[in-house]
Image (cartoon, rainbow, N blue to C red):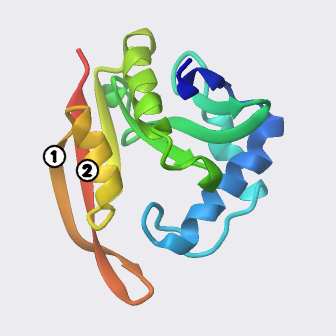
């Protein structure tokens, strides 16, 4: 049995928001995956949570033996209806579960869900210095569609933001 068979994906419930935020906040100190510089509160992310719907822009949690170990978010791109078939994907994995090929598993699950969600284009917003994420997304055929040089400043260091894209169908 593959270890990935131990992972179950489901739509997030509001009661999952604290662990979703804990996982997110755990990534902030690395300065690799988010532009937030300080931890965010559960309250500050309630509107973001409520913008997700299982039929249009889902927010999934991943469980292993009853413990939430990762989450996946689909978010609308640019907030205008002409872009409804384009979504940004975000994947955050609890530090205890990184390095187990869970990222690959989740990107594939996201790609597989796109036709049902009527998503034709997936985007990933990734810092240029985040080589593991760049490599992960490129494995699935995501290509660099935009390079925004020096648009983020993390601890006094200017960082590039890359937008990776993939046409699904």
Considering depth in this image, is 82 or 37 the residue closer to the camera?
Answer: 37
In the image as oriented, which residue stretches furthest toward the right? 15
- Secondary structure beneath disc 1? strand
Q: Are marks 2 and 1 in contact (CB under 8 Å)?
A: yes
Is disc 2 surrounded by few (<14), some (14 to 19) or many (20+) residues within 10 Å? many
Q: Is residue 132 above or below residue 68?
A: below
Residue at which label 2 appears: 163
Residue visible at 33% across and 62% down in the picture: 130
Quadrant of the image containing the N terminus: top right
Image spot of residue 90 (x, y percent): 47, 43
Query: In percent of the image, x 70 and y 31: which residue is there?
Result: 63
Q: Disc 2 to disc 1, how far (Cα)?
A: 6 Å
Q: Residue furthest bottom?
A: 156
Residue placed under numbered mark 1 in the picture: 145
Residue 135 in the image, given as x and y percentages of width and height: 26, 48
Query: Which residue is at a point 26% across and 64% down the rendered structure image?
Result: 128
Query: Residue 32, relative to residue 4: is it above or below?
Result: below
On the image, the x and y values in percent for residue 36 come to: 53, 68
Local SS, label 2: strand
Query: Where is the C terminus found, in terms of image quarters?
Result: top left
Q: Nearer the viewer, residue 43 or 18?
A: 18
Image vertical order of residue 119 relative to residue 153, above or below: above
Q: Is residue 34 rendered to the left or right of residue 20? A: left
The residue closer to the viewer here, 41 or 25, is: 25
| Residue 108 occupies quadrant | top left
Q: Nearer the viewer, residue 138 or 37?
A: 138
The single residue placed furthest to the top in the displayed view is 116
């Amino acid at each position: 049995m593959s270890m990935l068979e131990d992972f179950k994906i489901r739509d997030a419930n509001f009661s999952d928001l604290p662990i979703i935020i804990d996982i997110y906040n755990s990534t902030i100190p690395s300065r690799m995956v988010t532009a937030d510089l300080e931890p965010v509160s559960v309250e500050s992310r309630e509107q973001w949570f409520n913008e997700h719907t299982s039929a249009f822009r889902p927010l999934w949690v991943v469980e292993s033996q009853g413990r939430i170990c990762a989450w996946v978010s689909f978010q609308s791109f640019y907030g205008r209806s002409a872009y409804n078939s384009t979504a940004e994907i975000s994947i955050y994995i609890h530090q205890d579960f990184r390095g187990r090929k869970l990222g690959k598993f989740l990107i594939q699950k996201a790609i597989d869900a796109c036709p049902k969600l009527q998503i034709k284009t997936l985007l990933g917003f990734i810092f240029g210095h985040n080589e593991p994420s760049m490599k992960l997304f490129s494995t699935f055929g995501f290509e660099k569609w935009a390079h925004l040089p020096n648009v983020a400043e993390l601890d006094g260091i200017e960082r590039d933001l890359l937008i990776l894209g993939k046409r699904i169908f």
